[in-house]
């Protein structure tokens, strides 16, 4: 649909001095075929016994309790990866700066802070310093 230009004639130049209304491509709005997204395993609804034990071994300052309440699957996963210290920096980068498809709201500030603290603790440990 075309509309007359605003009174000051500001806007894109068109031969007949009309604004051309455009609509976003429907390609961007359509759902992607399922084959483009890998199958995900269902998220855990609670902490595993191993994750409970792992949390209790962390220094109190670094215990991610809000994350455990809101995102137990993340804590379960961190517990699994924790013993493989060389993998942790990449794991934290993926967790906090994910480029996975879809709209992602990001973590609440409290959770993000806890994850950043854990990441800092890992960096201290890898430098041979005490957290």
Image: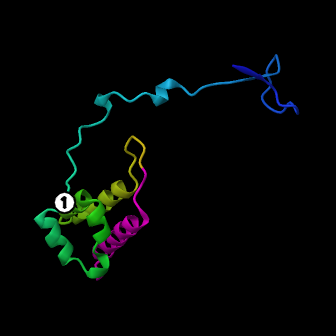
Asked where in the image residue 54 lies, by quadrant, the reply is bottom left
Residue at far bottom of view:
130
Asked where in the image residue 87 lies, by quadrant, the reply is bottom left
User: Which quadrant of the figure contains the C terminus?
Assistant: bottom left
Residue at far right of view:
8
Q: Eyeballing the image, is 103 above or below 76? A: above
Q: Within 10 Å of the Cα at label 1, are there few (<14), some (14-19), or many (20+) other Cα atoms?
A: some
Residue 81 located within the stretch drawn in magenta? no
Q: Eyeballing the image, is 115 above or below 15? A: below
Q: Label 1, on which residue?
A: 46
Give how far across and how far down residue 83 sits, in percent: 17, 66
Give how far across and how far down residue 106 sits, in percent: 42, 55
Left or right: where does residue 62 sit relative to residue 18? left
Measuring 40% from the left and 41% from the top, which residue is drawn there? Answer: 102
Q: Secondary structure at mark 1?
A: loop
Asked where in the image residue 68 lies, by quadrant, the reply is bottom left
Tag count: 1
Measuring 20% from the left and 55% from the top, which residue is drawn there? Answer: 45
Measuring 27% from the left and 74% from the top, which residue is drawn there? Answer: 63
User: Which quadrant of the figure contains the N terminus?
Assistant: top right
Residue at far left of view:
49
Give how far across and how far down residue 89 sits, in percent: 32, 62
Residue 128 located within the stretch drawn in magenta? yes
64 and 6: which is toward the camera: 6
Residue range (magenta) = 105-131
């Amino acid at each position: 649909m075309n509309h007359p230009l605003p009174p000051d004639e500001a806007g894109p130049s068109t031969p007949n001095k009309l604004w051309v209304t455009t609509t976003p491509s429907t390609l961007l709005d359509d759902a992607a075929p399922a084959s483009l997204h890998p199958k995900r395993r269902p998220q855990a609804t609670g902490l595993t016994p191993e994750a409970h034990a792992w949390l209790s071994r962390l220094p109190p300052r670094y215990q991610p309790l809000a994350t455990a309440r809101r995102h137990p699957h993340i804590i379960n996963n961190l517990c699994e990866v924790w013993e493989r210290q060389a993998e942790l920096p990449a794991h934290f980068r993926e967790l906090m700066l994910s480029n996975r498809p879809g709209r992602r709201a990001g973590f609440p500030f409290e959770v993000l802070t806890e994850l950043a603290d854990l990441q800092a603790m890992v960096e201290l440990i890898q430098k041979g310093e005490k957290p």
